[in-house]
Each structure stands twice: as structure tokens, then as C-alpha cells.
Image (cartoon, rainbow, N blue to C red):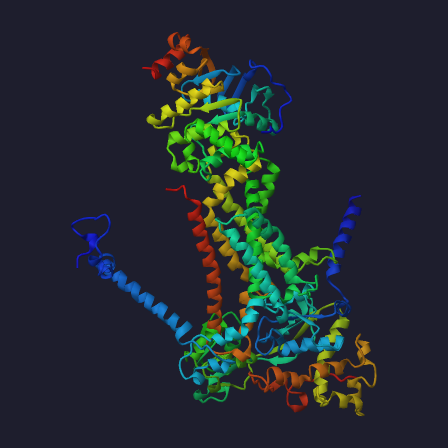
Amino acid sequence: MVNPNLDPRGYQPGGVPSRERRFRVTTWARANLFNSWLNAVLTLATLWLIWTVCWPLLKFLLIDAVWDGASRVDCLADRVGRDVGACWPFIGAKLPQLLYGFYPINEQWRVNLTAALGLGLLVPLLMPSLPYKTANAILFFGVYPVVGFVLLVGGMLGLEHVETRLWGGLLVTLVIAVTGIVGSLPLGILLALGRRSEMPAVRGVSIIFIEFWRGVPLITVLFFATYMLPLFLPAGWAINPLLRVMIGVMLFAAAYMAEVVRGGLQAIPRAQYEAAQALGLGYWRMMGLVILPQALKLVIPGIVNNFIGLFKDTTLVLIVAIFDLLGQLRAAFSDPNWAAPTTVATGFAFAGIIYFCFCFGMSRYALWMERRLNPADR
Amino acid sequence: MKRVTLVVALAAMSTFVAGSVTAQTLKTVRDRGALTCGVSQGLPGFSTPDDRGNWTGFDVDFCRAIAAAIFNDPAKVKFSPLSAKDRFTALQTSEIDVLSRNSTWTMLRDTQLGLNFAAVNYYDGQGFMVRKSLKVNSALELNGASICTQTGTTTELNVADYFRANKMKYEVIAFSTADETLKAYDAARCDAFTTDVSQLYAMRLKLAKPDEQMILPEIISKEPLGPVVRQGDDQWFDVVKWTFFAMINAEELGVTSKTVDEALKSTKPDVRRLAGTEGNFGEQIGLTKDWAMRIIRHVGNYGESFERNIGSGSKLNIDRGLNKLWSKGGIQYAPPIR
Amino acid sequence: MSEHGSSPVIRTTRNAVAVELSGVHKWFGEFHALDGVDLKVMRGERVVVCGPSGSGKSTMIRCINGLEMHQRGKVVVDGVELTDNLKRIDEVRREVGMVFQSLNLFPHLTVLENCTLAPIWVRHMPRREAEALAMQYLARVYIPEQAAKYPGQLSGGQQQRVAIARALCMNPKIMLFDEPTSALDPEMVKEVLDTMVELAMDGMTMIVVSHEMGFARQVANRVVFMDFGQIVESAEPEEFFSHPKHERTKLFLSQILH
């Protein structure tokens, strides 16, 4: 069958009549996948690789999986009578703990409400086409943290006080990641501007801050914040352990963000600075209206990279006895009631899926934003 | 002038340091209204959260026993799940009041960390798990066997010592994580699996055919596990220590959580002293007269706690072995309350 | 339209001095870019500055709105002396518009937003008013229909005209042009020059660094020749082109005129 693309008649504007397009898949395959010996071998090797990896995965997650059960015996090959893959009842039984940690069951509606409010404010903010951005931003960055804090911690307005030591699972992961992400970007921008400043004091402080926080591993930061800091504070002062960790993570991430933003600032030609100055714009207006919009747009890949890394780095808080999603998962593994050969694999698969959803979502959103922000690029 | 400022600075620093070491743990716990207890991040049978998020386990029970003794309420405990790396740091910096986390009592830990081990609530040791089909009944029949172990632990060293001492040959197949090691054993890549016996029972559940495994009777190392407190607070040390001894003595005297009321009415002198109807031993350590009965009523005696969490009443089904009372052939022995 | 932070010096007469440079020196490290420059430009005057590359023409013009800081001498713009005081510099920049060789439009904003940015944020004009003003100036440079486009979608000549409109939106008293047509394709030079001629005819004080001698002849009150950081010759266009006094001027003219 003649491949329309290789047709000796040449390119035909308007496309080829549909009758001739019927066998497009095989002709495309012949043209692209098998058009030389090397390509044919590579195609076969790739197909084989996909087969050996994807098929067992699919088998484990879906085909051989157990979907119903009340304890470990339901996930044993003897009982079920066949090879057993993922033990999803285990996830089902542990799901409240994986999502909320040890948050009291009858107060979990507060967590749900906080999440719903957050989503409700964040999604419109992330969509450039929707209006009232300033109001939205003020609500999300200014009002929501306070509301979220009150809802989650309680102790006022008739809400029962829930200690942060009881928080765990995805709740903790999101709390730490969101505050880290939201806090590190403005702080990072300020540090980047400070590092490029001509005032020696400002520049010195920025450089010291950035190099210090980049020079120590996050684990050290968490450890120090949790165990060493109380020794230096006067006896009466007690800062909430979760808060210490959140601040440590935020400062740590801000140092990395500062360097990413600085890269973007360096890429903006001097001419832009001069044009803005020539119009009479002061330093902060120039940065906010002319330079930073362009610089940040340039380094969206770097910024989102940092966010994704930060999101996954939150699992390090297990070192300081805070149970994030993975920590809660490992505690769930130890329940003898659910010990079975595939329990551990199921748990990690579940965690992997959750992390993938969040990280991939962030990554795709960033790509979409990039495309949208560059309409002038032809 | 310089000397004065130096002295003032040192004095200021010492108040910071002193502020973090309290010799008043019992008072702090009472004021707080709850005990802070360091546990593991998930160890089957010893400390693990159940489906509803409540901590259960043998070590957890001990913490609840202390809380029952102080507050008459076993629920007044806040659990701090700690990893192996930061468990002692948390205790040293007063993040927790007592560490009940499967910690082995060694001289190094007892003398160089500023900590004291209050008791041994579980005599553990390294053992072997083999398939029943191997038809082996004792570790001494393992000459020439292949043993799966985890690298970087004392288990490899203990195995080497044991086989050398008994002039037997063996082959070590080592992996970096416990789960990997177990999977290799499950896949029949080796004849025996070795780690601490309490772990063996737990890991057995994760195998495809748990009923076809057996745990050999030999214990080839010493791992005395028990609760830990800070040095420098003798009163608190006594509280924790005697909470444990009360549980042992109760089992010896036959007092269970169901027979507490009878014990209160008993006429036997040692039961009366335990129950607090005679003498004021509880008050000597800062608790109430009925401190022991509070423990037994809410948590049970040693045997009850053992069977419920890791013994015949649980999925692990560990044999009491060395942890039997001294009068029954084991080595759990508590000083008398008198 | 309100002016923010007006200078204490009162400017009334039309014949006031717009720009005065006295004994201005500037070094870039070892390189002596400006070597004792004296220049006086009156209100409504159009001055064209020419000279070989590296002669300091751009540096001089950039000293006038503070993009370069002179190290010795005095620069007085519209009665305000330029010193290290940042507030003073901002005041001056509001009244001095600049058009660059490399166009320098803000690529992330539309043409209209480019023009309204400064009036809104510096003069605190309401958005509607600023947009009306911008449209007015865009019409004046004959590209009102491009208002919603991004700079990347316009030709070089169109972009430069937008740059002129953008500068005009601040209603400056003085306009500086730093080789505005040097980077444009030849067919677009004319449209930009025509705009500048119209601007001159409306009475704007202009200092233009350029090699476009036709423009100089047509519009300039004075042509200034610079070489090696000094003003070598300054005369009316007729005088300048037909009877140059200095050797260097003659040499330069012979090179660019044919």
C-alpha cells in the first residue's frame, strides 16, 4: 500500500483522500519503526522491555490483586487459591491512618474541610483566565493559613484541640510541603535580589544565608531543629515540633530557590533594567513589574523542579519522629494482623502512586503555564 | 572586669544546660497530665498502631502501666514513635520521659549515654528459622547449611562465633535490608534465616507459608530488652523499675486483672503488701497506696501482657521461654515488695 | 494627572536651560570615557550628537538621565542636579524620556501595557486615563491598531515607534535618543525618523545621538561632534556640514557623507 507521506506525487495540500489513508498505522510503522535494520532491532528490543516491565506490574496491581478482605489470611496464596498480587484490603483498612495519621476519627471532617478550602482557593488562582486574582491571592496567602491553622489545631471556637503530634500521613506531608513551597518562593526571591544587591550588608547576609543552608543536609537541619534547638532556648519556651520542622524546611528550600531565581535574573539583559529605570520606575517597581515576571517565567522548570524535590524530601521528617505518608506506611507494615508476603509491596506501590500523582500534576501544570505565558514566542 | 563577665556568661550558659536536665520527671509528668513515651515506628507485637490508630504492643503496655500507676488511667500516654537513630537523643533531651522501645541493655549504653536501664522486660536473643521440611530439630544440626542474614548487624558476628565454637561449617548469604533477606529465604535460596527470635516470629507471618516454618530452640546471643530513663532522677528510676516489678510479682502471686478485687480483700501478707492494704510502699516512691493494683487492673500482670501482645493470644505466638517466671523455669525474677 | 514629588526649583520661562553639563568626567576603570564635557541645551532645542564609536556620545547621553553616574563635574537637568541621591535621580527620570538603540520594549506586556506601565505606577494615573493617553500617543506614532499585540509580533520599526510612544506617555520635558535607528533595517529607518521629525516640530527638547545626517539637517538646531570623550565642534547644521572647523570633524564627515 502506498504511504501517503512517501507518495511520489509529493505533498498534497489539504491532505490525502481518506480512502488512501486506511492503512496508515502499518505504513507509519513500516516507515518509522522498521525502516532500517537498526531501527527494527531497537523497536523489538523496546517492545520486549515494555512487555517484561509493564505486564508483571499490571498483573501485580490489577489482575492478581485481592480486592476484598478483613485480615492477612485473605491475602495469602493458600487461602485464595492462586498467586496473589497486591493486597488492597490492607490499604483500605489503613487508609484513614495513611491520610490523617492519628487525627481523632470524629474530627477528621476538619481536615477534609481544610483541604477543600485550600483546593477551592488554589485552583482559581492557578488558572490565569479567571478574574479577581488579587482578591484570590489575598484570600489564599493571607486568610487561608489562619483559617487552616484554626481548623486543624483547634482549641478555639468550640473546636477540640488536636495536638500536632497526632497528625500524620498525607496530612503531614501536605502541610509541610505546601508551607515549604509557598514560603520558599517569596523568601527565595528576596534572597536572590539581596545577593545581587549593591549594598554590602544586604549582599553579605544573603550570601551567608544561602551558602549555609545549601551547605548542610536537610536531615541535619531537621535533627538540629528538633533536638538541639530546645537546648538553646530558655526553659519556658517550647516551639511545636512540627512548626520547627516546617520552618527548617522552608528556610532550606528558600536557599535553593534563591539560586534558581538568581539564574533567571542574570538572564535578563541589562537593557531591560535600563529601560525600566529610564521610565522612572523605582527599584521595587522595576523588579516587580518588569524584571521578575520575565525572570520567573524563564526559570519555571527550575522552580517546579525544586517544588517536586521538596515534596518528596518531606519524607525525611521520619528521622525526627514525625509521621508523614511513608512513616505512617511503615507503621502500618508492622501490624501483625496484616502481615503477608505482598503487604510491603502493596504499600509502597500505593505510596508511589500518590507521590506520582502529585509530582506529575505539578510538572504538567508547569508545562501548561509555560506554554501559556509565552504567546509572543513564535 | 573581664573575669566578671566570663563568670556571668558561664552562669548564664549553665542555666540553659541545667534547664534541660530535670531531676523532677514525676512532677513534670503529673503537671503535664500525661506521660510521654518513646516507642518504635512499627514493630510487630511490641509497638504498632492498630487499624483505628491506637498504639498497642508489649512495650506500649508497659508505658500504659506507668501511666496507670500515676494517673489511674492507662490512656494518659502520648506516644512518640522514634527511629533507632534518634531514640536515645530524644530521651537525653527530655523530649520523652521513658523509652520503651525494644532497646538492648549494654554496658556502653548504660554508662556512656547518661541513661539508665530500668529493667529487662524481654530476654531476647538470636535464633534460627528453618523450614519444617528440612527435618532439623536443633541448631547443632545445621552443619554445612546456608544462612540468610542482614549485613551491618551483630547477627553475622554472632553466627560466626556460634558456628566456630561448635566446629560447624556454614555459608552466609547476606542482604542489606530485612525484607530482602526474608524474600531470599522464602525463595529457598538458603536453608535458615537468622535474627532476634522476637523478630523471627513476626517475620514468619510475612512468608508465603508461615505454618511450614519452625523456630529452633537455641538462642545464640544475649539481647536483654528493657525500658530506659535518664540518669540523675532516682525517684523516676524507682517508679519505672517498680512498675515492672509489680507486674512480675503480681503474676507470681497469681493476681490478674480479673482478680484485683479479690486481691484487695486477701489476707496473705505478700498479696496485701502488693495491693497496698498493708504498708505504704507506693507513697515512698511518690505514688499512691494502690499503685500496683492500678497497674494490674488496667494493664494486667506480666504474663497477661505477654500473652496478649506477643504470646499465645496474638498472631506472633512466641513461646515464653526464658521469659517465664523463675519458679517456672525462666529467669524473670522481681525483688519482693516489702 | 498629578506629578509626584516635584522639584523645589521653579521652572517658568520657555528659554530656561533644559540640560547643562559642566566639566563632566567619567572613567570606566582606566578608560577615560568623558574628558571634560561642557554642553548646554535650551528648552525646545534639538541637538544631534555624532562621532566615531567609542567617542563617548552614548555615555554622555546616559549621564543625563542617570543611567551612568559621572565622577567629576556637574550635570543639571531641568534645574535639578544629578547626584548620588536616588530620589533625585528618579525625579529626573520622570521628566526625561529615553529611546534606546536596542528597542528595549518589555516582551511580557502588550504594546498598550508597555505604554501604560509608567503612568500608572509612577504618576499614579487611573488605568482608564492611562490607556486613553497611551492610545493617543500610539495614534500619534501611527500604530494604534497594534495596541493588543506583543512586541515580538511587531517589526523593528513598529517597535521603535512604540518605544517612542512609551516614552512620551510620561509627558517628558526632554527626550533622549541613543542611536534609535542604528539597529533597524533600512526600510524601517524612515518611518522612525518621520516620527522624530514630527516630534521635533511639536517643540520637544531633543538630544539625539545618530548618524542620520539627513535628519540632522532637517531638524537640528545644533550638531555636536564628539571624539575621544570631548566635544570637538558644535555648530548649526549648515555651518557644520559645509564648513567644519576641525581636522577630526572633517575626517569624520568625509567618512560618513558621500
In the rendered image, residue A236, in percent from the top left (x then y), is placed at: 75, 58
Give whichever of A298, B232 is nearer the camera: A298
In the rendered image, residue C142, in percent from the top left (x then y), is placed at: 41, 28
Q: Is residue A30 left or right of residue C99?
A: left
In the rendered image, residue C119, in percent from the top left (x then y), is placed at: 54, 32
The picture quadrant where one finds residue C53 is: top left
In the rendered image, the quadrant that contains the N terminus of chain C is: top right
In the rendered image, residue A323, in percent from the top left (x then y), is placed at: 58, 66
Q: Residue furthest left?
A: A8
Q: Is residue B109 left or right of residue A90?
A: right
Q: Residue at x 60, y 36 (%)?
A: A200
Give whichever of B46, A170 is nearer the camera: A170
In the rendered image, the quadrant that contains the C terminus of chain C is: top left
How many numbered marks have been drawn onto this rendered protein structure?
0
The picture quadrant where one finds residue B308 is: bottom right
Q: Is residue A37 left or right of residue B34?
A: left
Give whichever of A89, B13 is nearer the camera: A89
Q: Is residue B279 left or right of residue C220?
A: right
Q: Residue furthest right?
A: B279
Q: Is residue C228 visible?
A: no
Q: Is residue B118 visible?
A: yes
**Compared with residue C187, is residue A59 higher up or lower down, i.e. above or below?**
below
Give whichever of C229, B251 is nearer the camera: C229
